Image: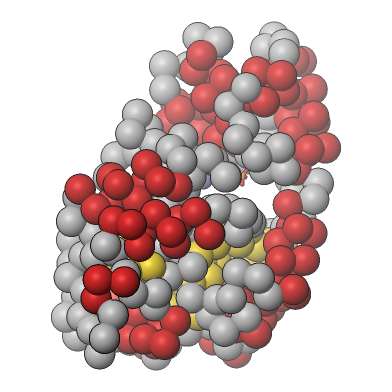
Amino acid sequence: MTSYSNADLHCHSVVSDGTLEPEALAARAKANGVELWALTDHDEVGGQQRAAAAARAQGMAYLTGAEISVTFAGTTVHIVGLGFDAQDERLVQGLARTRGGRGERAQEMAEQLAKVGIPGAYEGALHYVGNPELISRTHFARYLVEAGVCKDTSEVFRKFLIEGKPGFVPHRWASLGDAVRWIRDAGGVAVIAHPARYRLSANEEFALFSEFRQHGGQGVEVVTGSHSAAEAVSYAAMAQEFGLAASRGSDFHSPDESHTDLGMLPPLPGHLTPVWDLLAERIQHPAALKG
Ligand code: AMP
Ligand code: MN
Ligand code: MN
Ligand code: MN
């Protein structure tokens, strides 16, 4: 089994809500020392071929990826899929259904913002959208910064677009079971993304991890750009308790917005099984390293 000291298995391109093209991400990952990479756009696999080709050109190993939006216990949870067949029909259709409804949701978000004196947010957000099927809160956040309403996107996500604040529109995403099955049935491994970010009670979190396992989920992000060192320790313990493999990913979106750059993360704790150990057959090796 190949060991990778720098794997980054979570980031976004212009195909969802990142600001870089897949090729630019691959070059940046390589420059930062990444050896195994995955592009994990939200609810979308449209960038996978370009990402895999770019990884090959950079001499990096590659795993296919996507980050699926799921509704669980009334909140949004993200499930990262890795190493699946990106052409799998059920996965592709499931992702298309998950994306559907983003346009209407965005119109409603803009209506709410207009009511608090911020007109034109839909059109403004659209300027930042690379994929018309994937208008997201991030694109609205960029517009609100451009319009001078907030100084940066993290201020936007404190004052707008979140539950209880203007511009938040509840949305029903995929079910946990569907998301895990789409990934598994397409040959991949499902991973709970950045678990410390969810506002779940201890009971709900236990339910998330147990149901995820029952559905066939196999991994959890332990080291991510969204976790503090203490959170990584606590989710390392959860990985052991639930018998899950551990993943590592920056969740990089943009050089201007992301605190954690591609590959710039602490190592996975040594006692955990890295998620790529479950995916040895699915890793696309660069030509130079082939037999
Ligand atoms: P959506 O899928 O449209 O609900 O948008 C979710 C995206 O918004 C996430 O993937 C992040 O990129 C971004 N986001 C959510 N919360 C925050 C936050 N507190 N700070 C920065 N970005 C955030
Ligand atoms: Mn995002
Ligand atoms: Mn996420
Ligand atoms: Mn993400």
- Residue 241 at x, y = what percent? 37, 87
**Can residue 205 be seen at all in this image of the molecule?**
no
What residue is drawn where x is 35% and y is 62%?
56
On the rendered structure, is 97 left or right of 256? right
Q: Above or below — where is 54 with respect to 258?
A: below
Q: Above or below — where is 132 with respect to 77?
A: above
What residue is drawn where x is 18% and y is 61%?
266
Q: Nearer the viewer, residue 45 or 140?
A: 45
- Residue 215 at x, y = what percent? 63, 86
Residue 274: which quarter of the image? bottom left
What residue is drawn where x is 36% and y is 86%?
280
| Image quadrant occupied by the C terminus | bottom left
**Can residue 96 be seen at all in this image of the molecule?**
yes
- Residue 156 at x, y = what percent? 51, 26
What residue is drawn where x is 58% and y is 27%?
128
On the rendered structure, is 170 left or right of 6? right
Residue 116: which quarter of the image? top right
- Residue 105 at x, y = what percent? 78, 38
